[in-house]
Image: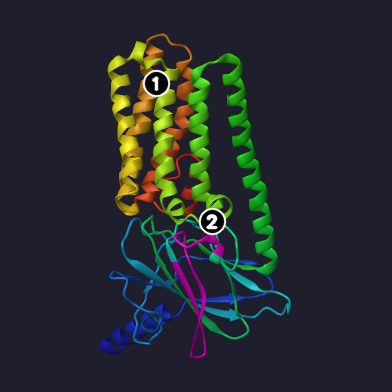
C-alpha cells in the first residue's frame, strides 16, 4: 500500500511538470512567463527542435520568478503551451523578450505535428533582418488552435530571458510608453551634453570637457543596452552591435576616472591615489582594445568584477579630497554615492548572485553591465 502511494505520488509530480500552460482570455492583456515554466539546459548547445519536441525529452520546472541563469555557455530551451479562450476576433497575441543583449534566439511554434519557425534573431544579426523592427525581440503568435512554443536562447552576456505575452492592444500601449520614456531620458542626456559644451566654450574649464566625455560615452553605452543604437544608429554594423557594450563601458569608466582626478584635484590632494587611478585608466584602455581580441563573455566578466572596486576607489578619492578641505568634494561624494549602490547591485545581478529583471531595468541607467 505504501509502495502504491509512493508510485502514484511520483506520477502526480511528473504530470505537474509535463505542461506549463498559458490560457489566454478576454479579461487579461499581459501574461508573464516566469515561475513554473519548463526549461532544459543544453550544455553542449547541440539539441535541435525535433529532439526537444520529442515526448521522451524531460524538462525541468523553473522554481524562481525570473528566468535568470547568470553567465553560462549553455543554450536554454523553454516550453510553453498556449490555449486561446479569447472571444475578440480582432485580437492578436504577441510574445516579447525584453532583454536586448541576447545573441541567438529561436522561437518555434508547434501546432499539431507541424513546427513553424517564428523568429531567428539576436543582437549578432543585422537589425534589417528582423520581421518586426522593434528594439526588443517580438513575434506574433498563431493562437487559432492549441499550440506549444519552444524557445531557444544562447548568449555570451548574462542569460536573462524576461518573456511576456501581450494582447495586440496592450503591446501598442507598452511600445508607445517606452518611446515617450526613452525620448525623455535621452533628451535629458542631450541637454546635459549641450550645457557642458556651452559651459566649456564660455568658461574654458577642462572639467566641463571631461564631464562631457563621460556623459557622451555613457549615453552611447545606454543606447547599446536599450537596443536603440542597434535599431537606429548602427543596424547593419554587426561588430559594433556585438562589441559596443564592451567598448563604451570601458570608455565610460575611463572618462569617469579622468573627471574624478581633475575635479577633485587629486594630483594636489592625493598624489599616490592619483597615480593609481592613472593605472586604472590604462587598464580600461587595454580592456577596450581586448574586446576586439577576446570573447565577449571573458571581457564582460572582467568588467563586472571591476565594478566592485572602482566605485569604492572613486568614493574614497572624494573623501580624501574632503579631508584636505576641498569643499567641492562633498558634491562629488553625494553624486557618486548613487553610482556606487547601483553598480554593486547590478554586478551582483549580472553574476547571478541576485535575480530579477527589475535590477537590470532600474540600474542599467547607471552602469549597464550585462
Q: Position of residue 167 (x, y in %)?
A: 65, 69
Q: Is residue 108 magenta?
A: yes
Q: Which of label 1 and label 2 is nearer to you?
A: 2
Residue 204: which quarter of the image? top right
Distance from the alpha carbon under mark 1 to that under mark 2: 36 Å
In screen coordinates, is 321 left or right of 33?
Answer: left
In the image, residue 213 above or below residue 266: below
Q: Nearer the viewer, residue 171 or 280?
A: 280
Helix, strand or loop at mark 2:
loop
What residue is drawn where x is 47% and y is 18%? 330
Residue 235 seen in this snapshot: yes
| Residue identifier under label 2 | 235
The residue at the far front in this view is 237
* Secondary structure mostly seen in the magenta stretch: strand
| Residue identifier under label 1 | 261
In the image, residue 115 above or below residue 283: below
Q: Nearer the viewer, residue 65 or 296?
A: 296
Q: Position of residue 219 (x, y in %)?
A: 53, 40
**Which quadrant is home to the N terminus?**
bottom left
Residue 361 seen in this snapshot: no
What residue is drawn where x is 32% and y is 20%? 274
Sequence-first disc among 1 and 2: 2
Q: Is residue 156 magenta?
A: no
Q: Residues within 10 Å of mark 1 (few under 14, many from 20)?
A: many
Helix, strand or loop at mark 1:
helix
What are the residue bounds of the magenta stretch?
Answer: 105-128
In the image, residue 57 above or below residue 225: below
Q: Position of residue 192 (x, y in %)?
A: 60, 30
In screen coordinates, is 139 left or right of 310?
Answer: right
Q: Nearer the viewer, residue 263 or 204?
A: 204
Residue 2: which quarter of the image? bottom left
Amino acid at each position: 500500500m505504501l509502495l502504491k502511494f509512493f508510485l502514484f505520488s511520483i506520477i502526480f509530480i511528473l504530470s505537474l511538470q509535463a505542461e506549463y500552460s498559458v490560457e489566454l482570455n478576454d479579461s487579461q492583456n499581459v501574461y508573464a512567463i516566469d515561475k513554473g515554466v519548463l526549461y532544459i539546459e543544453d550544455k553542449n548547445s547541440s539539441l535541435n527542435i525535433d529532439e526537444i519536441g520529442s515526448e521522451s525529452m524531460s524538462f525541468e520546472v523553473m522554481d524562481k520568478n525570473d528566468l535568470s541563469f547568470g553567465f553560462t555557455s549553455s543554450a536554454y530551451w523553454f516550453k510553453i503551451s498556449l490555449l486561446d479562450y479569447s472571444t475578440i476576433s480582432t485580437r492578436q497575441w504577441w510574445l516579447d523578450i525584453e532583454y536586448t543583449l541576447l545573441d541567438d534566439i529561436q522561437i518555434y511554434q508547434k501546432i499539431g505535428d507541424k513546427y513553424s519557425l517564428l523568429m531567428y534573431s539576436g543582437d549578432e544579426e543585422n537589425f534589417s533582418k528582423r520581421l518586426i523592427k522593434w528594439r526588443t525581440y517580438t513575434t506574433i503568435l498563431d493562437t487559432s488552435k492549441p499550440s506549444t512554443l519552444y524557445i531557444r536562447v544562447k548568449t555570451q552576456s548574462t542569460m536573462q530571458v524576461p518573456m511576456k505575452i501581450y494582447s495586440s492592444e496592450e503591446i501598442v500601449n507598452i511600445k508607445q510608453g517606452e518611446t515617450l520614456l526613452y525620448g525623455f531620458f535621452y533628451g535629458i542626456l542631450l541637454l546635459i551634453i549641450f550645457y557642458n559644451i556651452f559651459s566649456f566654450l564660455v568658461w574654458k574649464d577642462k572639467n566641463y570637457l571631461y564631464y562631457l566625455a563621460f556623459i557622451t560615452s555613457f549615453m552611447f553605452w545606454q543606447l547599446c543596452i536599450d537596443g536603440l543604437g542597434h535599431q537606429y544608429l548602427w543596424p547593419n554594423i554587426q561588430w559594433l552591435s556585438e562589441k559596443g557594450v564592451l567598448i563604451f563601458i570601458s570608455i565610460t569608466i575611463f572618462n569617469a576616472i579622468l573627471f574624478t582626478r581633475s575635479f577633485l584635484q587629486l594630483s594636489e590632494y592625493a598624489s599616490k591615489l592619483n597615480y593609481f587611478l592613472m593605472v586604472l585608466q590604462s587598464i580600461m584602455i587595454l580592456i577596450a582594445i581586448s574586446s576586439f581580441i577576446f570573447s565577449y563573455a571573458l571581457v564582460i566578466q572582467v568588467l563586472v568584477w571591476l565594478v566592485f572596486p572602482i566605485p569604492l576607489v572613486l568614493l574614497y578619492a572624494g573623501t580624501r579630497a574632503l579631508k584636505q578641505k576641498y569643499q567641492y568634494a562633498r558634491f562629488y561624494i553625494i553624486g557618486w554615492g548613487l553610482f556606487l549602490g547601483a553598480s554593486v547591485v547590478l554586478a551582483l545581478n549580472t553574476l547571478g548572485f541576485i535575480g530579477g529583471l527589475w535590477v537590470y531595468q532600474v540600474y542599467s541607467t547607471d552602469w549597464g553591465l550585462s
